[in-house]
Amino acid sequence: MSNFEPKIVCFLCKWCTYSGADLDGTSRLKYPPNGVVIKTMCSSRIDPEHILYAFQQGTDGVFIGGCHPGDCHYQTGNYKTQRRVLLLQKLLQQMGINFERLQLEWISASEGKKYANKIIEFTDKIRELGPVSRMDGKEDIE
Amino acid sequence: MKKIGVFICHCGVNIKDTVDVERLTEELADYPGVVYLENYMFMCSDPGQNLIKKAIAEHKLDGIVVAACSPTLHESTFQNAIEEVDINKYQMEIANIREQCSWVHNVKEDATLKAKLIIKSAIEKLRLNESLIPVSAPLTKRVLIIGGGITGIQAALDIADGGYEVILVEKKPSIGGHMIQLSETFPTLDCSQCILTPKMVQAGKNKNITLYANSEVESIEGFMGNFTAKIIRKPQYVDPDKCTMCDDCTSACPVVVPDEYNEGLSFRKAIYVPFPQAIPSSYTIDMEHCLGFEPIACGECREACEPDAINYDVKTEEISEKIGAVIIATGYDLYPVENMAEYGYGKYPDVLIGLQFERILSATGPTGGVMLRPSDGTVPKNIVFIQCSGSRDPERHLSHCSKICCMYTLKHAKLYKHKVPDGQSYIFYIDIRSGGKRYEEFIQQAVSEEGIIYIRGKVAKVYKEGDKMIVHGMDTLTGKKMEIETDLVVLSQGIVPSEGARQLAKSLKLSTDEAGFLIEAHPKLRPLESLQSGFYLAGAAQGPKDIPDAVAQASGAAAKVLALMANDEISHEPVIAYVDDNKCSGCGICIGICPYGARVLENGIAIVNDVLCEGCGACISACPSGASQQRNLTDDQINNMIKVILG
Ligand code: FES
């Protein structure tokens, strides 16, 4: 398992996190290349079905980035995302997929460093968890 | 199948050094739908663009993917380029292989593989992209301005000068706002009324401005470019055309009430002119206090009125106005002084708020501009000013800084000194904030030349002893308690949004901050717009502000509105939600989700109002039947992208 390289799908909202990720580039910060980005207008566009579909297609992790609470370009989209992600984490766990494979972070357009750090952490975590399987759901989450 | 061209940019060495562009060109050649590939040093350059245009023509491409820098940089460049060869601009996708690939990874092999996935996912998105045209709607070239203070007046004049019609709504019987109550303005000490009155007259006379005083906006329906405002106009009961301003009515009126213009320091009658320079210049009956609604009980003014201008039977009017944009300039109120019992306001007549002191300083005020204290009409020999009364006190009162108090308090102290040269003033302060142009000089000059004493600290209590007021406080610089015996205490009361503004914000669904001030679309880059399209903000409704800033914002908001009005119709991004009628069950979940009120039920189908929709996509992921979709980012497109990324 030592040379396992996880596959990760990243959903980033255009207004905050996508710009934050761009800033990493401009500042030449480095992070692992495992994740590929799908840009949405707002994090609230991400349908739980897309996340489930990604797991079905064999992703090892899904990373979602949105604007900080109160900063969503569309007023309250990120609150909706948060509710959906919390529910979905429970569902994943019930399906036997470790809920930590789905992570939501608030990253603003100025937080390039935070984006890089979060991607590094997330990739490390998924590496540790190993390839996705229906058997890796740990204890139940609260 | 759509014929797709892929154009990979080297960006000099920025991409090429980390991503093997030749290998990508080779390996993507047999990707489904791709009929043409090319890599080039600078795609964004003129030769680069020409190369794209030539390839489109030669290979009859239906759409292109440009693998280059972030779309924030050159999306529009390439969109414009393909439009020149008659390809819809939505048939172009950027694959961001610089900011999100070559610049953030070191190993060429890894970066190349990732770039390939990014390009493939862009191809998948493009494959199902539709050609779109911007959504357009008619534009009503009339503007509603709510609030007739200096901000509203300035914005109205600017827009009227630009040639568009303005509806100016003021809740009070006259425009002028708080500024007309002020004596002189800092830091130049020019007379507030002298600079404002001409503007009021202009606003009253301008043929492009319709003024509704004594009126309130009840609701605004519709969307940017096409609003209908419902305005409630309270009657004045005096016909301004017949009224000769003889003033016989006020002498006849038996009702006496505190005068708002003088902040309760004098009295007026129930029939009155708010102040001599009022616009519209006419009498009003204050229906809350008038006895004439029982004509048997009174009717004195009508009898006294020779030209027969008074009519008690006029009813409240409901006016409907069509407008294209709204400027909110509802201004401020003072933080309720009743909340600050420790200062004894209301209990002692010689504890005043700043606006009352302003009236005492004013030539049109209750004392005719002579410095006299309210309790016994004597000249105060000293005054204690208390700054931040209610402001910067998150535990008990407001957490924000009211911004103008440092300056107006000093102005008060200065004007007092001009009227009572041997008088002494003390100012309790937390910090002195004098960031405006020439404000610091204003303060320094006053401190060195006028002998004003600043005490850093807070006042704990104010009480009366004999005919003196005793101010108990603490000098936080020396740590000593202090007690000052004084003739008058003036509170620099904190600023809050006006009551009407809060209600209005609620009914119009405009977002406000914790203090109730309106929130701008972006704190730095879009400070004059609300997130709600078509609504603009100016003046103290958006946050505490001095006159120069309020006027600057007013002109700024007016410029924004004028730019909008210069269009023949309004248009916006078509990348919005749409609904598949056959799949929609009419459950209405999307209606509650939409922050813009863009989803409405029509014949059992939750349709999308194209003009209102901002394209966030929240309703799409909430739709249980998959009937709601986003143009050029449908569920299928997202799933196809996921599939190739994980390929
Ligand atoms: S726009 Fe970033 S989360 Fe809504």
Image (cartoon, coloured by chain):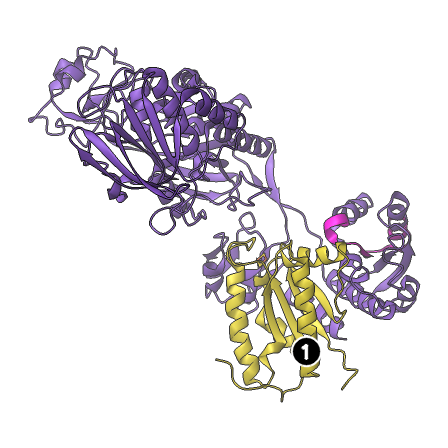
Chain colours: A yellow, B purple
The furthest residue to the bottom: A135
The part of the image, by quadrant, that contains residue B217 is top left
Residue type, mark 1 in image: Ile
The C terminus of chain B - image quarter: bottom right
Q: Which residues are magenta?
A: B53-75
Give the mark count. Answer: 1
* Residue positioned 19% across, 27% down in the render: B313
The part of the image, by quadrant, that contains residue B505 is top left
Q: Percent position (x, y) of residue B21?
A: 90, 62
Report ligand 1 position as a quadrant: bottom right
- Whether residue B61 is in magenta: the answer is yes
Q: Percent position (x, y) of residue B164?
A: 52, 26
Q: Eyeballing the image, is B432 above or below B56? A: above
* Residue positioned 53% across, 49% down in the render: B612
Q: Eyeballing the image, is B361 above or below A142? A: above
Q: Percent position (x, y) of residue B307?
A: 20, 11
Q: Percent position (x, y) of residue A54?
A: 66, 75
Q: Tell me, yes or no, if residue B186 can be seen here.
A: no
Q: Eyeballing the image, is B413 above or below A133? A: above
Q: Which residue is mark 1?
A: A126
